[in-house]
Image (cartoon, rainbow, N blue to C red):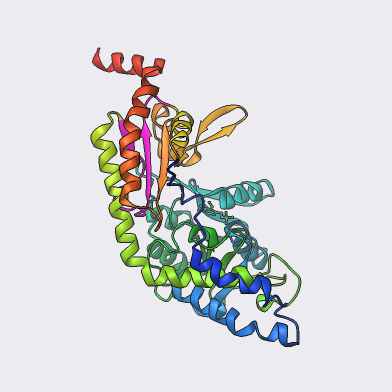
Amino acid sequence: MKVVYLDNNATTRTAPEVVEAMLPYFTDLYGNPSSMHLFGGQLAKPLNRAREEVAALIGADPSEIVFTSCGTESDNAAIWGVLHSYPQKRHIITTRVEHPAVGNLVTYLSKKGYKVTLLPVDREGLLKPEQLAEAITDETALVSIMWANNETGVLFPIETLAHIAKSRGVLFHTDAVQAVGKIPIDLSRVPVDLLSFSGHKLHAPKGIGVLYIRKGTPFTPFIIGGHQEKGRRGGTENVPYIIGLGKACEMARKHLVEENRRIRKLRDKLEEGILQSIPRVIINGSRKERLGNTLSISFEYVEGESILMHLSNLGICASSGSACTSGSLEPSHVLRAMGVPFTAAHGSIRFSLSVYNTEEDIDYVLEHLPSVIRRLREISPFWEKGESARSA
Ligand code: PLP
């Protein structure tokens, strides 16, 4: 069966070049970098090179890169690390549309007595920088705002937001898990203090993440142990994965602009094709301020899960904007925060592309999706009622 993988915001294929770069570090070069003997010593150079590649992708200094196990750990380390450094400050500002790696953590913190401000977004998923300025108080320890939304691809104006926080003397963290490798990032220009990202979103394996900590940022380690990562994250370095991430970052940096232009064209072709062939669809999120690889689209009066199952039977992998909670399908918190109508939020699908997608992939989806939606609407009682209500 033909397989068309369009769920790259969930995870990406590990690039064959990345796998190849990693392999010797499982077999011959398996030492512990802390060991004094030959096996440890020979790892210093390749680890440094990988750190340099990771730093180069985001315009950082290699000393500002801390390797972690995933994006979630990086987000937790950033938030806890700052809160522990400012125990007297008990206020955090974030948004209503963060990934659970930040969203569920701040919910937990609010139960522990922290004051949490959740900035709202508008119908396009955008937020107003003035709202951040208004929310900052003397109590604010940290602002944490994602760079790109994982569901809609909507981009927040991180440079402006970080300047606002900086001008008020408040530290700024961004969850850039969906942004790194997809848009150019230059931290020598953008004054964020902490930034998280994750290897498996940019063709490195799962199990490796990065926390960028700007020089001079107060930070208490989240994982306390050995002296690794200059005391900022204990635990023996995951050498093969760090090497793999270095390779993935090198590839992303070299091909970012041209590949993302190509991917954006494919995404736009998919979007236009759907709009032309299927009635009653809604694009979720700003079409202007959006990642080039992401398309969140709602098909009114059908359920996202049913669409996914039909697509999956055709070998097409995407994801839906609903979460199955206590047996009922709840539209995602992101779509709810944007005020997407219930009938549309339920039928939302996210397509997310990568460097491995081709024109044929998009043609294949456009060939099959209209009939999937038509068939599902034919058996949907809501479609009938919705259509007759509109024509009445
Ligand atoms: N933040 C965002 C925006 C994400 O999309 C994800 C993963 O989907 C994460 C954090 C968590 O990253 P990880 O899966 O590496 O823990």
Is residue 297 within the magenta segment? yes
Count of marks overlaid on the render: 0
Looking at the image, which is closer to me, 370 or 328?
A: 370
Magenta highlight on residue 176? no
Q: Nearer the viewer, residue 16 or 86?
A: 16
Residue 107 appears at what percent x and percent y? 61, 46
Q: Residue at x 56, y 74 (%)?
A: 65
Residue depicted at 32% across the width and 53% down the height:
289
Which quarter is ligand 1 in?
Answer: bottom right
Q: Quadrant of the C terminus?
A: top left
In the rendered view, tell whether residue 137 sits above or below residue 110: below
Q: Position of residue 90 (x, y in %)?
A: 62, 57
| Residue 179 visible in the shown view | yes
Q: Residue furthest front?
A: 1
Q: Residue 199 at x, y = what percent?
A: 54, 62
Q: Residue at x 27, y 46 (%)?
A: 269
Can you say which quadrant of the picture contains the N terminus?
top left
Q: Nearer the viewer, residue 277 or 314?
A: 314
Q: Quadrant of residue 161?
A: bottom left
Residue drawn at the location 38% of the way across and 72% of the way down: 254
Look at the image and give the residue range highlighted in magenta. 281-302
Q: Quadrant of residue 212?
A: bottom right
Question: Is residue 212 visible to the viewer in this orientation of the structure?
Answer: no
